[in-house]
Amino acid sequence: MLRWALVFLIIAIIAGVFGFTGIAGAAAWMAQVLFLVFLVLFVLMLLFGRRSPPA
């Protein structure tokens, strides 16, 4: 998921350089959404992930 966020960020930067502001804005928004979803899932996995059984 982080990889897709980076892909959309690169698309947004390239589209912004070439003047495609609509595409750049949409790609940047999608990159932000994917990054936030990644962060939420990462924190949830840290909190509720697999734990080794107590010895």
Image: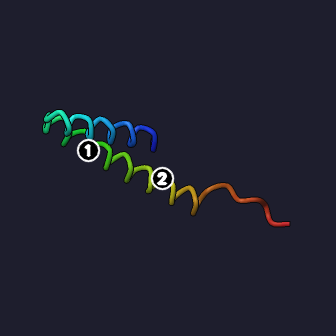
Residue 15 position within the rendered picture, expressed as x and y whole percent measured from the top left: 21, 34
Which residue bears the numbered disc 2? 41
Residue 16 vs 52, above or below: the answer is above
* Residue drawn at 19 percent across, 39 percent down: 16
Quadrant that contains the N terminus: top left
Q: Residue lying farthest bottom?
A: 55
Q: Residues within 10 Å of mark 1 (few under 14, many from 20)?
A: many
- 8 sits left or right of 55 in the view: left
Say what amino acid the circle numbered 1 marks.
Ala
Mark 2 vs mark 1: in front: 1
Q: How is the image coloured?
A: rainbow
Q: Residue at x 58, y 60 (%)?
A: 46
- Count of numbered labels shown in the rendering: 2
Q: Tag 2: Cα neighbours inside 10 Å, few (<14), some, or many (≥20)?
A: few
Name which of mark 2 and mark 1 comes first in the sequence.
Answer: 1
Percent of width and height locating residue 47: 57, 63
Q: CA distance from mark 2 to mark 1?
A: 20 Å
Label 1 sits on residue: 28
Task: Give residue 42's mark.
Answer: none
Quadrant of the image occupied by residue 11? top left
Query: Could you tell me which secondary element the residue under label 1 belongs to?
Result: helix
**Residue at coordinates 32% horizontally, 42% vertically from top-left?**
9
Residue furthest to the front in view is 17
Between 15 and 3, which is closer to the camera in this rendering?
A: 15
Q: Nearer the viewer, residue 35 or 40?
A: 35
User: Percent x, y for residue 45?
Assistant: 56, 55
Q: Quadrant of residue 55?
A: bottom right
Q: Secondary structure at mark 2?
A: helix
